[in-house]
């Protein structure tokens, strides 16, 4: 194992535990992956809680999802992860989870609506809606829009976020959940009001800058 893979595996453990502690991946739900410099992918195993992650635990697969190394079997969502890596050369980290407020929107068929919170928009961008699909069918549903979005609301299921690193995907899914919580609270006060168009244009520029770093 090369040195940077060791560091990446340790970082994956830290992020898995944070995701679990924040209720983003309750029980044994959710999965994470990282694309290594070599092009190979480390993905969490199926049937295990991310809270129990260890550096050795992640399964190494190629971009077609074939297992290369690891004692456990990779997540059943591995085909979705490898599909995204094939389509998006800029993506190095992916997280799928069931954070409760975001998943509430997904179950109700609600959308995030127009940009209403500046930081949320900078970290998340436009959230794409994806109609319900089984793990085997999710890649097909993502095909149309995966190149234009970094965050996806999965109908009747949960959330999926992408980033130039696992850390960025982590910021994105935490921001998504916080945004879903605050939108839910804003409903008490009559609902979130959209940001002015001029502000959205400035924030889009800031988002482009941040993503290119
Ligand atoms: Zn799921």
Image: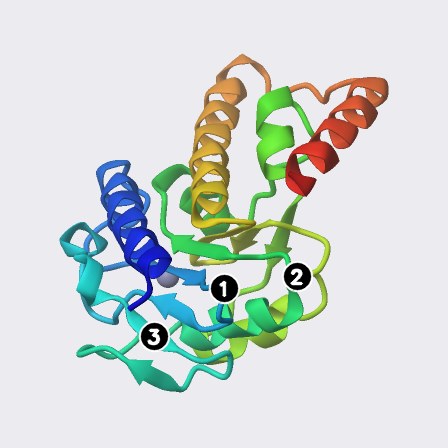
Q: In the depicted view, which residue is nearer to us: 145 or 1? A: 1
Disc number lying in front (2 or 3): 3
User: Which structural element holds mark 2?
Assistant: loop
Disc number lying in front (1 or 2): 1
Instruction: Check if mark 2's residue and mark 3's residue have beta carbons within 8 Å.
Output: no
Disc tally is 3
Residue tagged 2: 146
Seen in the image, is 173 located left or right of residue 189? Answer: left
The residue sitting at the top extreme is: 189
Q: Residues within 10 Å of mark 3 (few under 14, many from 20)?
A: many
Disc number lying in front (1 or 3): 1
Instruction: Check if mark 1's residue and mark 2's residue have beta carbons within 8 Å.
Output: no
Please, is residue 116 above or below residue 40 in the view? Answer: above
Residue tagged 3: 60
Instruction: Check if mark 1's residue and mark 3's residue have beta carbons within 8 Å.
Output: no
Looking at the image, tell me whether mark 1 or mark 2 is earlier in sequence order.
Answer: 1
Please, is residue 104 above or below residue 184 in the view? Answer: below
Is the CB atom of the residue marked by disc 1 within 8 angstroms of ligand 1's nearest atom? no
Residue shown at the point (34%, 74%) measured from the top left: 60
Seen in the image, is 76 located left or right of residue 108? Answer: left
Residue shown at the point (64%, 51%) measured from the top left: 128
The residue sitting at the bottom extreme is: 66
Q: Quadrant of the image for the N terminus?
A: bottom left
Q: In the depicted view, which residue is nearer to us: 15 or 149? A: 15
């Amino acid at each position: 194992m090369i040195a940077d893979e060791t560091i990446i595996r340790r970082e994956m453990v830290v992020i898995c535990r944070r995701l679990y502690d924040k209720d983003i991946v309750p029980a044994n739900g959710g999965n994470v992956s990282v694309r290594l410099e070599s092009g190979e992918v480390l993905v969490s195993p199926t049937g295990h809680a991310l809270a129990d992650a260890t550096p050795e635990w992640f399964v190494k697969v190629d971009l077609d999802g074939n297992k290369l190394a690891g004692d456990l079997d990779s997540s059943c969502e591995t085909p979705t992860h490898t599909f995204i890596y094939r389509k998006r050369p800029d993506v190095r980290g992916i997280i799928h989870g069931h954070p409760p407020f975001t998943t509430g929107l997904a179950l109700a068929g609600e959308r995030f609506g127009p940009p209403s919170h500046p930081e949320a928009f900078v970290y998340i961008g436009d959230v794409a809606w994806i109609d319900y699909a089984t793990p085997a069918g999710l890649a097909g549903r993502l095909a149309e829009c995966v190149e234009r979005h970094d965050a996806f609301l999965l109908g009747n299921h949960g959330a999926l976020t992408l980033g130039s690193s696992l850390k960025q995907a982590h910021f994105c899914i935490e921001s998504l959940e916080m945004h879903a919580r605050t939108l839910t609270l804003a409903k008490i006060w009559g609902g979130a009001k959209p940001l002015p168009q001029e502000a959205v244009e400035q924030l889009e520029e800031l988002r482009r800058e941040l993503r290119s770093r």
